[in-house]
Amino acid sequence: MGHHTFPAADADKLEDATMRYRHCSAEELHWAIDPDPTDSVVDLGSGTGFFTDDVAPHVDEVYAVDVQAAMHDRYREKGVPDNVELVTSGADELPFDDRSMDAAFATMTYHELPGAAVEEVARVLRAGGRFVIVDWTADGPGESGPPVEERYDADHAAAALREAGFSVAFRATRSDTFLLVATLDGE
């Protein structure tokens, strides 16, 4: 993982609801995360907060994590909900305590995450916590999103999740994307 990051200069494209919801609707993301109003959730590769904004009304707090401070600047311009904290960090060294989060999600960013990110998410999630990944599939045509050679398929992502101590609870592959819902094993 970790081929590139989305160019901050193109951040306006991340606010294109027609394109973004074509690959993952707010309802589908809400279903996959299955949030509780008291949850603390991490959005990995939050960008301009497009999907963060969909999750925020349903949880206590969301940590919008992005490696690019410029993406947070764009998010501030459009307005950040009160229960969202912007965190400039790589996903391989999250600044959260062990077992402090209830859920994490990565929408169209799994292919950008460093190799240690899945293990790091396992560190910060409570046992039974959910990790939701929606990303471009290597099995897709490559007409949208990153080049096919920079993508992974659902098998690769599921194997990485299992290796880090997750059980895959749901899996779907569509023409351009895949969706995985995993829960962290343990007590």
Image: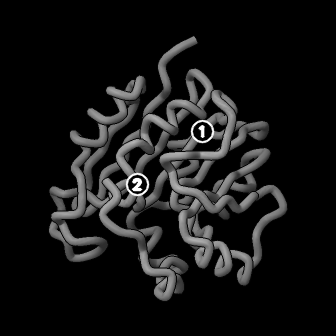
Q: Secondary structure at mark 1?
A: strand
Looking at the rendered structure, the kind of residue marked 1 is Ala
Q: Does 110 sit left or right of 15 as displayed?
A: left
CB atoms of marks 1 and 2 within 8 Å: no
Tell me how far mark 1 sits from mark 2, CA to CA.
Answer: 17 Å
The residue lying at 51 percent from left, 60 percent from top is 45
User: Where does the image place residue 133, in percent across and percent down from the top left?
Assistant: 42, 48
Looking at the rendered structure, which numbered label has been put on residue 48?
none
Question: Relative to 181, is 153 above or below?
Answer: below
Circle 1 crowding by C-alpha within 10 Å: few under 14, some 14–19, many from 20: many
**Residue that badge 2 annotates:** 113
Q: Does 140 sit left or right of 157 as displayed?
A: left
| Quadrant for the C terminus in the image | top right
Looking at the rendered structure, the kind of residue marked 2 is Leu
Question: Relative to 164, is 108 above or below?
Answer: below
User: Where does the image place residue 4, in percent across and percent down from the top left?
Assistant: 35, 68
Q: Secondary structure at mark 2?
A: loop
Q: How is the image coloured?
A: one colour
The residue lying at 62 percent from left, 72 percent from top is 69
**Residue that badge 1 annotates:** 103
Q: Nearer the viewer, residue 22 or 148?
A: 148
Q: Does 24 sit left or right of 63 as displayed?
A: left
